[in-house]
């Protein structure tokens, strides 16, 4: 017989969320809002989709990357290398990583951004892309 305060699990197949997942999602959430704040501070437009040549796509997945991307972005914005950023406009609790699409101001900025993430100790997964309007639709 069940105790009065004992919770009855009506769906035994449901997996309980591990504490590690909750910690990571909180870190992703905090990083997302920190980045949005920095972009706003530097008046860099955030858009749902970017298009153009030399777009730098960055995947921010692990703890060290999530903890350091905000300070790296701030330094890059101080150098005026980024014209706009592709980032989700709304945060979702299901995010486990952050994908950024950086639209540089020119070709030299593309090369500099690529070099920064290539040489980073945090081993960001990044790639330089040409995204045309038909790709972004």
Image: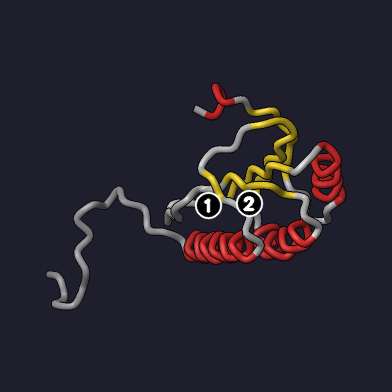
Q: Residues within 10 Å of mark 2 (few under 14, many from 20)?
A: some
Q: Eyeballing the image, is 101 above or below 36?
A: above
Q: Eyeballing the image, is 104 above or below 137?
A: below
> How far across and how far down the image is residue 87, in percent?
55, 48
Residue extending farthest to the top is: 134
Residue in front for this viewpoint, 16 or 126: 126
Name the quadrant containing residue 41: bottom right
Callout 2 secondary element: loop
> How far across and how far down the image is residue 117, in percent?
80, 48
Report the label total: 2
Residue at the image position 85 percent from the left and 46 percent from the top: 112
Residue in front for this viewpoint, 43 or 54: 43
Q: Which residue is mark 2?
A: 61
Residue at the image position 72 percent from the left and 30 percent from the top: 53
Callout 1 secondary element: loop
Residue in front for this viewpoint, 3 or 69: 69
Q: Residues within 10 Å of mark 1 (few under 14, many from 20)?
A: some
Distance between the Cα atoms at labels 2 and 1?
7 Å
Q: Are marks 2 and 1 in contact (CB under 8 Å)?
A: yes
Q: Which residue is mark 1?
A: 96
Q: How is the image coloured?
A: secondary structure
Residue at the image position 73 percent from the left and 41 percent from the top: 126
Q: Quarter of the image containing the N terminus?
A: bottom left
> How far across and how far down the image is residue 115, in percent?
86, 45
> How far across and how far down the image is residue 22, in percent?
47, 63
């Amino acid at each position: 017989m069940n105790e009065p305060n004992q919770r009855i699990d009506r769906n035994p197949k449901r997996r309980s969320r591990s504490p590690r997942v909750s910690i990571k999602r909180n870190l992703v959430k905090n990083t997302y809002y920190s980045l949005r704040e920095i972009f706003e501070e530097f008046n860099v437009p955030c858009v749902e989709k970017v298009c153009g040549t030399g777009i730098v796509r960055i995947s921010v997945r692990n703890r060290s990357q999530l903890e350091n991307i905000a300070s790296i972005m701030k330094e890059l914005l101080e150098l005026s290398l980024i014209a706009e950023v592709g980032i989700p406009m709304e945060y979702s609790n299901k995010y486990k990583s952050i994908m950024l699409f950086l639209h540089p101001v020119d070709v030299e900025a593309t090369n500099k951004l690529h070099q920064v993430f290539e040489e980073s100790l945090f081993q960001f997964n990044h790639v330089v892309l040409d995204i045309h309007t038909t790709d972004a639709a």
